[in-house]
DNA sequence: GCTTTATATTGCAATATTACGATTAATATT
DNA sequence: AATATTAATCGTAATATTGCAATATAAAGC
């Protein structure tokens, strides 16, 4: 079917999985790292740095934007992308809770 | 093409994206939460609790296992799955570094 | 050995993802 | 106005994912 059954899961589970999915690609991780590094980034800079075509990078940026992880404003001819602090904080909190809920005490298997 | 160009990214970027991808599904998050909660878990418990078919859950478990996030040992007729502490710690570290590298100081756009 | 129980595997259909060339739209520059 | 630059979108091909029914496997109990 290829269609995730979102209706049987909690809001939180769906939200977290959506955010994780948006980051679950090496190109998108690279893009985020690059944006964080320069604290302001233009799509054109990425083309050439990563070895991907312009259309592909634009698509990845769109996915990150759709997930709310980055935001972009038009800056003349080019577009300036940066991290959406709100979503980033949400991600840190949700993931922190999730990852932190496991305390590797008793090893069972 | 549908084929990620892993060769153009760093080892770390690929590793992190693989781990994130393995968790980027509400069913797999639910499974992990359930495993953490009971600290030892049998696949059969999940069938019926989540609203997914046995084959589907088995597949999700396999994916989590392939990524090294969980491990399973045969316990008589059933299989006991639990978190792989080593991978979990790795994930916490890698994600911590990645998420922490962004300090929402200067808002640019 | 046969049956039950628990999980894995196979095969399939529907849909999603990844990547790119070509094109388009919008602004800058000449 | 004509041209160049930048990024988005469209169309397409290749591959991956999701989910399930059906079947297979493996261990336990009879």
Image: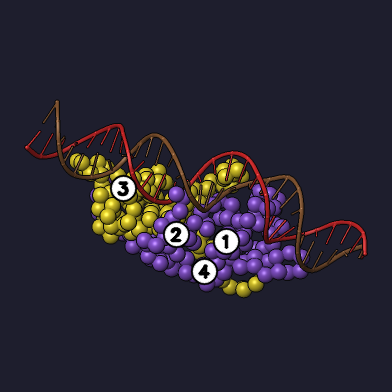
Chain colours: A purple, B yellow, C brown, D red
Element at label 3:
helix
- The residue that appears at 60% across and 43% down in the rendered structure is B1
Element at label 1:
helix
Closer to the camera: disc 2 or disc 3? 3
Is C1 placed left or right of A60 in the picture?
left
Element at label 2:
helix
Spot occupied by residue B5 in the image (x, y as percentages of width and height): 59, 44
Is B25 placed left or right of B14 in the picture?
left
Residue named by callout 3: B54
Residue named by callout 1: A64
Mark 2 burial class by Cα count in 10 Å: few <14, some 14-19, many 20+: many
- The residue that appears at 65% across and 65% down in the rendered structure is A81
Foreground: C13 or B106?
C13
* Residues tagged by mark 4 and mark 2 found on one chain of the structure: yes
* Image mark 4: chain: A
Spot occupied by residue B41 in the image (x, y as percentages of width and height): 26, 52
């Amino acid at each position: 079917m290829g269609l995730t059954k979102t209706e049987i899961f909690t809001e939180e589970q769906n939200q977290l999985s959506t955010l994780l999915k948006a980051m679950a690609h090496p190109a998108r991780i690279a893009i985020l790292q690059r944006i964080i590094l320069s604290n302001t980034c233009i799509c054109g800079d990425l083309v050439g740095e990563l070895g991907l075509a312009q259309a592909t990078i634009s698509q990845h940026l769109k996915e990150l934007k759709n997930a709310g992880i980055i935001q972009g404003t038009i800056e003349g001819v080019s577009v300036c992308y940066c991290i959406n602090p709100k979503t980033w904080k949400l991600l840190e909190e949700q993931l922190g809770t999730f990852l932190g809920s496991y305390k590797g005490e008793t090893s069972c298997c």
